[in-house]
Image (cartoon, coloured by chain):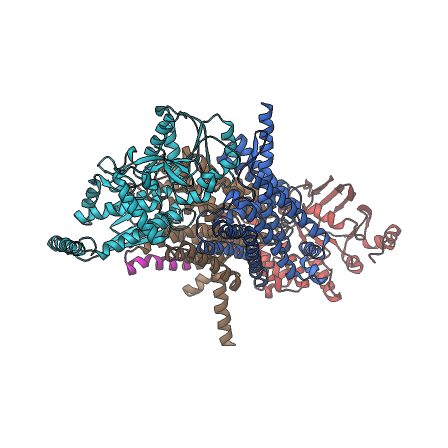
Chain colours: A cyan, B red, C blue, D brown
């Protein structure tokens, strides 16, 4: 096995050296990736998982001789969860570090802000943010990984209608993530047969949501959708319990993390969320192609870091795989690389099965999203 | 030039000043005396616009100034020195005096920021004007020192130069001789006469009887916020009512 | 229908009391330190953060007994209060007011960074003292933790008022707040008094952190926003007055609750800050009346 | 009369000479060091210096502290962004028009809150800033809400727009230098003198026939416009604005800049901005450590040099010099 792998690597190496020496003298020059991630502040757990995952991937690739003989170098900057900082670090990645591709950022409001700078610079980018806006409007060389608000909302509505819950209350945070979800929830409602009877925005800094949720309680909504990220799902969940609001509580995909379960404790029992299959690999049917990939990643992450991974690490994993596969095919020349990424088809990743195309830089369909419910402290598949 | 008619100031129910009327002729040195609490400083604050009167009127050269904001009264030609000298401590003496002439110049924020030529010419004029009055006050030689470095007596002269530089028609001096020794008081008397020499009218509060009696053309006596007497120094010195008022109070002699 | 309105009112009152208590614990602390030093302590929210995080990690994560965790949290906060006293009042004896203000900002920022290193940047929480099940009054509900918050806050503030009025140390603090120079002359140890005021306001902050974390959660960066809320409340009531701070805190909580109840969460803070500007303009000593009229003291922030 | 004595006689000449020298040095930097990422940093320094200089004018001359400069930075940024993006006015013109909006808002707010002083003024301006932030977040039809505004046109006119850092560098630094000169002139003019006097005693200034209140509003407007220009330049450089652009934290950061550089030194504001920018740049990726470093630095500077780093170092240099001669 080892010998086989080694010889394969050698073969690949030899082949790549041949291609490269024949094309241009790029041999051995490192490939640089930039990762602007949120590494501090309330969303740091997301960036941290991404960074850990990428570190391992880079080590693995380099130990195996790099991509076509070129080692991979990863440059991390902390975006601090602030759009202006994100733009500054992206500029630095592009102008100073001259990276070949960018993986990130994670927060929606950062992704939207850095779009212009990255597009101007023409650097291939794999966004790790969940908002549709990161690839809509579409630009030449920007792709996104996590399931976005559009498909998550459509999956949720499908579930709600099937459960007979058609009158809903919507609360969303006043930020880029809340904006995106709020828009989709509004736009898709009538077509799906859903009536939004209560709709209000709130601030992420708000730690006291009792008055808001009391209003929900007085409305005739049959379910509550909370579209927020970071710590807000925890506060919403706890407050829902404290004020005795008994209609089903449904979160966006941003709530699908161990941190939310931990923060909400027993109050999380029964709540729902929709998102990628990543949180419930073990309960997936065996014929699901993603099952094995997810289980393997989860196991190795837990072994290495002593805690469960989250979907943001998974996004980084998929991005790295798709990117390096494309580079393996065509190298780092921008145009060719963009085209190669765009041609990714049926890549079985942690976040779904990706197929990009000229008209679709999001790559996922509703089939990669499932509905979860918390039972005895863990996410279980409902549908 | 200054006519005060039936002036009244109440704080809550208390009348600090009640039905006071008098007038000051141009070029006169008029003194206001009276025991503590007689309402002298209140009178000054009313004339200068720091307080607005409850009733009555104040005319400067026939124009009513009662109740106008302090800055408008300053611009109308009333300047003052304070009981405790109040110089701008962090500015130089020259700058203090230059602030006196400040109001004559128009250069606004934009012109000054752009450093337009006319603002710089104004600055020259301002400086020349200030130096003239520093000279007048005899402190030209120390003009670059910080005002806070001066002893109290000299700060009084900075105030005088500053007040004169405003081109005031009337100067209100609140106890200028407080804390001065005999020689200094004498010098200050000369200075007040010099101010009158420039054609400026002076209204002065003081407790030093000798100083006032030798200096003032006319004296106004207030007692408990009421007009008590008015006349030349000798008339006042011989007035029984005044003597009684002063003997009756043990604060002042 | 009537029961709906009645329970709405009950709900508004209960939320106002709960949130108002949280604000009050910070506002009274801000006010105490302002009295003693003339400075607004930007690091006031760090007391809350440090205690909340300590209890969350020791009791919530590591499973220590609650009382031990609380004891450790109080020690941490007392140490921090002493450090702030050292930085703002002992080492910084000849610094302009704004300089001291900046020192408290610096302390707050550094503390956030250190806390994020010691723990992490995630949101933390621990179980409420008396379980999660809400108590129902008609249609209104209230978390048992809210009763803890309101009760303990009331005891703390009543105790503080008694302390200020009836003990020598409290009287010394009041004397200092009126006139520091005069207090020195009559032999009151000003520095010790300042330390005492930091200690007391640190304890109030710690109580706040321990009581409210189960409801509101806490993270390493929570402090500064709490501090801003606290000193707005203190200023609304009148800086330097304990009843004033309490009143300001309750008023802000009330306005916020009503705004969200009849209006929208998105505009939660708009009426509050409009009221503050109006109060500052028309009632410069605050609604209850604080120590200073505008500009009477500390006119110039940059003067040393 | 030599040039030097000529310059010395007149504050305006002296300021002009100093700023000209400074600008020349700045403009020569790319000639010497070539094009690089540092230009990006230098552009941010040019932009951030403006609100800092604005606040320095206010605090240095009037001794008051406003927490509204972040808000005016945001108003300048949003106004220019809206005018150029939605209405299609060219960025140079929109930057100027935005300042009229900033000036109007500053005049209205100033007229209301400048009666207050000290902590009360600080809290009142803080409250105003919070209200501005809320309005920006909520008026999403105009401001794009939390998402902010994207694709703001690049700075330029007459069909030519700046595309590279070096172009921005050569456009923005002269603007910053000219505004620095404006501020220096203002500060050394009779208006600066009047403001310094007002700081010591408004009633005395009034008694000299000077409308103290007008001067206070005037300097508040000018100081806010400085922040507003900074905001507009920022918007047209980075191409987007969000509610975080002029947040309370930003306002506090400007105050920290002054703490480092000195509250009454315009040049100090520049020094402070350089320090903060370097810190932001070189502590990248370590936001928690950055906070620790920043916090500890602030405390240390305040304790060692209470008037700020620049004035502190100047004092130190002077005392050493005298120490040697003595």
Span highlighted in magenta in the image: D18-35
In the rendering, at what x and y percent does residue A88 appear?
35, 50
Specify whether residue D25 is painted magenta: yes
Residue D286 in magenta?
A: no
Per the picture, the main secondary structure of the magenta-coloured stretch is: helix
Q: Quick check: B187 left or right of A373?
A: right
**Viewer-nearest residue: B128 or C161:** C161
Residue B72 appears in view = no
Q: Using the image, determine if residue D52 lies above or below residue B143.
A: above
Residue A259, position as x, y percentages in the image: 42, 45
* Residue nearest the observer in this picture, C71 or A31: C71
Give the left or right position of residue A363, taking residue A272 as reference.
left
Task: Note whether D316 is above or below D33 in the view shown.
Answer: below
Depth check: give the residue in front, B131 or A357. A357
Residue at coordinates 54% horizontally, 33% vertically from top-left?
A: C259
Q: Quadrant of residue D16?
A: bottom left
In percent of width and height, residue D63 lies at: 55, 53
Marks counted in the figure total: 0
Whether residue C2 appears in this view of the structure is: yes
Viewed as shown, does residue C21 lie left or right of D253? Answer: right
B190 in relation to A244, above or below: below
| Quarter of the figure that contains the N terminus of chain A | bottom left
How far from the left and from the top, in percent, is residue C212?
55, 45
Name the image quarter holding the C terminus of chain A: top left
Residue A7, by quadrant, is bottom left
């Amino acid at each position: 096995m080892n010998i086989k792998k080694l010889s394969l690597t050698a073969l690949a190496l030899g082949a790549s050296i041949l291609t490269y020496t024949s094309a241009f003298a790029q041999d051995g020059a490192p490939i640089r990736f930039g990762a602007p991630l949120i590494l501090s502040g309330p969303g740091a757990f997301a960036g941290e998982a991404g960074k850990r995952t990428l570190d391992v991937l880079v080590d693995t690739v380099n130990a195996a001789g790099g991509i076509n003989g070129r080692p991979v170098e990863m440059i991390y900057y902390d975006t601090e969860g602030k759009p202006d900082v994100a733009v500054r670090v992206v500029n630095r990645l592009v102008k100073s570090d001259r990276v070949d591709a960018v993986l990130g950022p994670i927060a929606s409001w950062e992704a939207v802000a850095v779009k212009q700078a990255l597009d101007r610079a023409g650097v291939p980018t794999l966004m790790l943010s969940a908002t549709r806006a990161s690839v809509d409007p579409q630009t030449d060389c920007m792709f996104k990984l996590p399931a976005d608000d559009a498909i998550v909302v459509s999956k949720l509505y499908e579930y709600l209608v099937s459960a007979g819950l058609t009158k809903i209350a919507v609360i969303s945070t006043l930020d880029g993530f809340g904006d995106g979800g709020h828009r989709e929830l509004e736009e898709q409602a009538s077509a799906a047969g859903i009536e939004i009877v209560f709709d209000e925005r709130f601030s992420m800094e708000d730690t006291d949501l009792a008055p808001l949720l009391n209003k929900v309680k007085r409305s005739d909504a049959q379910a509550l959708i909370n579209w927020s990220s970071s710590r807000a799902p925890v506060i919403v969940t706890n407050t829902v319990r404290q004020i005795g609001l008994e209609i089903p509580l449904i979160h966006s995909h941003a709530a699908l993390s161990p941190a939310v379960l931990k923060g909400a404790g027993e109050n999380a029992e029964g709540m729902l969320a929709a998102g990628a299959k990543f949180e419930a690999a073990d309960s997936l049917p065996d014929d699901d192609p993603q099952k094995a990939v997810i289980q393997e990643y989860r196991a190795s992450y837990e072994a290495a870091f002593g805690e469960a991974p989250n979907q943001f690490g998974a996004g980084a994993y998929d991005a790295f795989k798709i990117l390096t596969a494309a580079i393996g095919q065509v190298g780092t020349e921008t145009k060719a690389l963009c085209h190669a990424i765009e041609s990714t088809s049926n890549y079985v990743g942690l976040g779904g099965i990706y197929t990009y195309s000229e008209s679709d830089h999001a790559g996922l369909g509703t089939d990669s999203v499932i509905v979860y419910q918390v039972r005895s402290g863990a996410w279980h598949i409902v549908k | 030039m200054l006519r005060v008619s039936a002036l009244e100031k109440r704080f809550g129910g208390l009348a600090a000043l009640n039905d006071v009327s008098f007038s000051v002729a141009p070029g006169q040195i008029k003194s206001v005396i009276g025991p503590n609490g007689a309402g002298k400083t209140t009178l000054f604050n009313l004339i200068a616009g720091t307080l607005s009167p409850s009733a009555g009127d104040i005319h400067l050269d026939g124009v009513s100034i009662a109740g106008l904001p302090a800055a408008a009264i300053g611009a109308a030609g009333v300047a003052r020195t304070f009981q405790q000298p109040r110089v701008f401590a962090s500015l130089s003496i020259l700058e203090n005096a230059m602030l006196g002439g400040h109001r004559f110049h128009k250069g606004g924020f934009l012109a000054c920021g752009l450093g337009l030529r006319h603002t710089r010419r104004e600055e020259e004029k301002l400086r020349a004007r200030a130096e003239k009055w520093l000279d007048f006050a005899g402190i030209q030689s120390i003009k670059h020192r910080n005002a806070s470095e001066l002893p109290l007596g000299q700060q009084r002269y900075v105030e005088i130069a500053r007040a004169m530089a405003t081109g005031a028609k009337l100067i209100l001096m609140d106890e200028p001789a407080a804390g001065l020794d005999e020689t200094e008081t004498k010098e200050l008397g000369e200075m007040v006469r010099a101010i009158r020499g420039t054609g400026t009218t002076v209204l002065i509060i003081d407790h030093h009887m000798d100083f006032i009696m030798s200096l003032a053309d006319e004296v106004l006596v207030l007692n408990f916020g009421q007009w008590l007497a008015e006349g030349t120094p000798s008339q006042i010195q011989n007035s029984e009512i005044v003597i009684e008022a002063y003997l009756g109070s043990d604060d002042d002699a | 229908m009537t029961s709906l309105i009645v329970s709405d009112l009950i709900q508004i009152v209960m939320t106002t009391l709960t949130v108002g208590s949280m604000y009050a614990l910070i506002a009274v602390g801000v006010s105490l330190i302002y009295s003693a030093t003339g400075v607004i302590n930007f690091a006031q929210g760090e007391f809350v953060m440090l205690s909340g995080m300590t209890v969350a990690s020791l009791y919530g994560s590591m499973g220590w007994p609650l009382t031990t965790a609380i004891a450790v949290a109080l020690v941490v906060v007392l140490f921090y209060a002493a450090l702030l006293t050292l930085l703002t009042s002992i080492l910084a004896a000849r610094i302009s007011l704004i300089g001291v203000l900046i020192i408290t900002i610096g302390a707050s920022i550094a503390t956030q960074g250190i806390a994020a290193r010691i723990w992490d940047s995630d949101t933390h929480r621990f179980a409420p003292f008396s379980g999660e099940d809400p108590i129902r009054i008609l249609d209104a509900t209230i978390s048992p933790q809210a009763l803890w918050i309101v009760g303990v806050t009331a005891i703390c503030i009543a105790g503080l008022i008694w302390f200020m009025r009836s003990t020598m140390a409290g009287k010394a603090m009041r004397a200092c707040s009126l006139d520091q120079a005069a207090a020195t002359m009559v032999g009151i140890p000003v520095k010790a008094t300042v330390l005492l005021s930091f200690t007391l306001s640190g304890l109030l902050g710690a109580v706040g952190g321990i009581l409210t974390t189960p409801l509101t959660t806490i993270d390493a960066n929570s402090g500064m926003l709490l501090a801003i809320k606290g000193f707005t409340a203190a200023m609304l009531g009148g800086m330097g007055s304990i009843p004033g701070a309490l009143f300001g805190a309750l008023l802000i909580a009330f306005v916020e609750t009503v705004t969200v109840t009849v209006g929208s969460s998105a505009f939660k803070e708009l009426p509050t800050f409009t009221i503050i500007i109006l109060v500052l303009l028309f009632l410069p000593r605050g609604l209850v009346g604080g120590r200073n009229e505008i500009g009477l003291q500390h006119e110039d922030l940059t003067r040393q | 009369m030599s040039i030097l004595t000529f310059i010395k006689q007149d504050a305006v000449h002296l300021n002009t000479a100093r700023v000209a020298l400074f600008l020349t040095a700045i403009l020569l930097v790319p000639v010497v060091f070539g094009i690089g990422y540092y230009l990006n940093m230098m552009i941010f320094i040019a932009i951030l210096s403006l609100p800092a200089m604005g606040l320095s004018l206010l605090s240095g001359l009037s001794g008051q502290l406003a927490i509204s400069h972040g808000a005016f930075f945001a108003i300048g940024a949003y106004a220019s962004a809206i005018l150029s993006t939605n209405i299609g006015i060219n960025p140079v013109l929109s930057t100027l028009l935005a300042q009229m909006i900033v000036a109007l808002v500053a005049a209205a707010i100033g007229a209301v809150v400048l009666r207050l002083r000290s902590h009360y003024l600080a809290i009142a301006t803080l409250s105003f800033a919070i209200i501005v932030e809320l309005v920006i977040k909520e008026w999403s039809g105009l401001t794009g809400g939390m998402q902010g505004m994207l694709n703001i046109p690049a700075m330029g006119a007459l069909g030519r727009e700046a595309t590279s850092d070096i172009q921005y560098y050569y456009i923005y630094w002269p603007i910053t230098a000219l505004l620095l000169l404006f501020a220096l002139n203002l500060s050394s003019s009779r208006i600066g003198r009047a403001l310094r006097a007002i700081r010591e005693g408004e009633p005395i200034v009034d008694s000299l026939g000077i409308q103290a209140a007008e001067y206070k509003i005037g300097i508040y407007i000018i100081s806010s416009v400085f922040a507003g220009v900074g905001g507009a330049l920022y918007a047209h450089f980075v191409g987007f604005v969000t509610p975080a652009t002029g947040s309370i934290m930003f306002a506090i950061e400007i105050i920290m800049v002054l703490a480092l550089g000195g509250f009454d030194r315009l040049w100090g504001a520049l020094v402070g901005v350089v320090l903060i920018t370097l810190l932001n740049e070189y502590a990248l990726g370590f936001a928690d450590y950055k906070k620790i470093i920043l916090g500890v630095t602030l405390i240390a500077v305040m304790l060692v040099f209470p008037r700020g780093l620049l004035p502190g170092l100047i004092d130190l240099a002077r005392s050493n010099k005298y120490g040697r001669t003595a």
